[in-house]
Image (tube, helix red, strand yellow):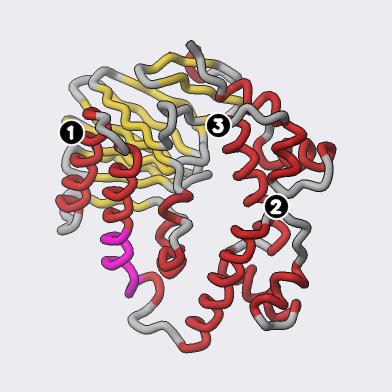
Amino acid sequence: MEENLRANSRSRFPDGFRILKGKQEYITYIENSSVRVWYADTPWEFDSHYHSAVEIIMPIRGEVEYTVSEFSYRVQADELLIIPPGWEHSLRMGENSARYLFLFEPDPIFGLRDMKLVEGILKIPIYLSGESEFQGTMRALLTQVVNVYEKRDFLWNTMCYSLLAQLYVRLGQINIARFMGKTTPRSSRSDTEIIDSARIYIDNNYMHDISLSDVSEFTGFTKCYFSRIFKQQTGVTFSEYLRQKRVSVAASMLVHSDLQIREIAMNAGFGSIATFNRVFLSEKTCTPSEYRGMYAKID
């Protein structure tokens, strides 16, 4: 088992390879998808690791032990645990246990404009115990995801995301009062609208040489005010957000296109191949060529 977790290792699963570099896992998916559902009913153990995907554990028999940061969970057959991207975690599944593990890239859901209203819940682990009145609804949605994933009908990936979106909508509706209060001040709504418009502008113009001045002017506010509320609303600076957006776009093109790396760098908005290589390495802890190699289709 330990050999499966060594740095830079490749471990074969029915729908792809598990690839690790140190503690960072690079999730692989079936072609034209970004959702993976993994069933196991034998003892299993993963050392501490993290990844860019959301992870949801749904035991159907016995329990699965999780450590997420400094928190420990013993997730039972009538419970759920949702781990957001970037959280270091380990897991252990003993004898007489069975579970479904869901992995999916969060951008299609987290990028929805009104999901920003419940951003707090998207960034921390969510544990639904057997006593929760909502876990039955959540497990029913995830069971539908399993059925869609296994049948692989046309547009199954989108169908899975529609169900996962329903799960997050329900979580948001349940927790909105706890995380944001029963009402949202007028000023906060205004700030949210400003950042929403800025995100749209960035999504449509990341490939160009845009600056903080360009985006703040687009929203109609001063650079100082815009920069402050952008950090408050998103948790990152404008330059960090733009860099992450460009790297995300470039990573997708590396996997899903045959373009040369220089072309990808230009299409993603990087001014030079040197800048692209440096920024990509900083964000992904590997070079663009290494990233493409890890995610290349394996016959």
Identified by mark 1, the residue type is Ile
Task: Give above or below for 202 relative to 291.
Answer: below
Label ID, residue 60: 1
The reply to whether residue 147 is visible in this rendering is yes
The x, y position of residue 182, in whole percent, is 33, 81
Q: Which residue is mark 2?
A: 207
SS for tag 2?
loop
The residue located at (21%, 47%) in the rendering is: 141
Q: For the N terminus, which image quadrant?
A: top left
How far is disc 3 from disc 1 in space, using C-alphas? Answer: 35 Å
How many other residues sit within 10 Å of disc 1, few (<14), some (14-19) or many (≥20)? some
SS for tag 1?
strand
Identified by mark 2, the residue type is Met
How far is disc 2 from disc 1 in space, using C-alphas? Answer: 45 Å
Q: Which residue is mark 3?
A: 256
Q: Which sits earlier in the primary sequence, circle 3 or circle 1?
A: 1
How far is disc 2 from disc 3 in space, using C-alphas? Answer: 18 Å
Q: Is residue 43 left or right of residue 195?
A: left
The residue located at (56%, 25%) in the rendering is: 295
**Nearer-the-camera pick, 174 or 225:** 225
The residue located at (62%, 66%) in the rendering is: 201
SS for tag 3?
helix
Badge count = 3
The x, y position of residue 143, in whole percent, is 19, 40
Q: Which sits earlier in the primary sequence, circle 2 or circle 3?
A: 2
The residue located at (74%, 56%) in the rendering is: 208
Label 1 near label 3: C-beta < 8 Å?
Answer: no
The reply to whether residue 287 is visible in this rendering is no
Instruction: Nearest to the eye among marks 3 and 1: give it.
Output: 3
In this picture, which residue range is highlighted in magenta? 169-178
The x, y position of residue 198, in whole percent, is 61, 69
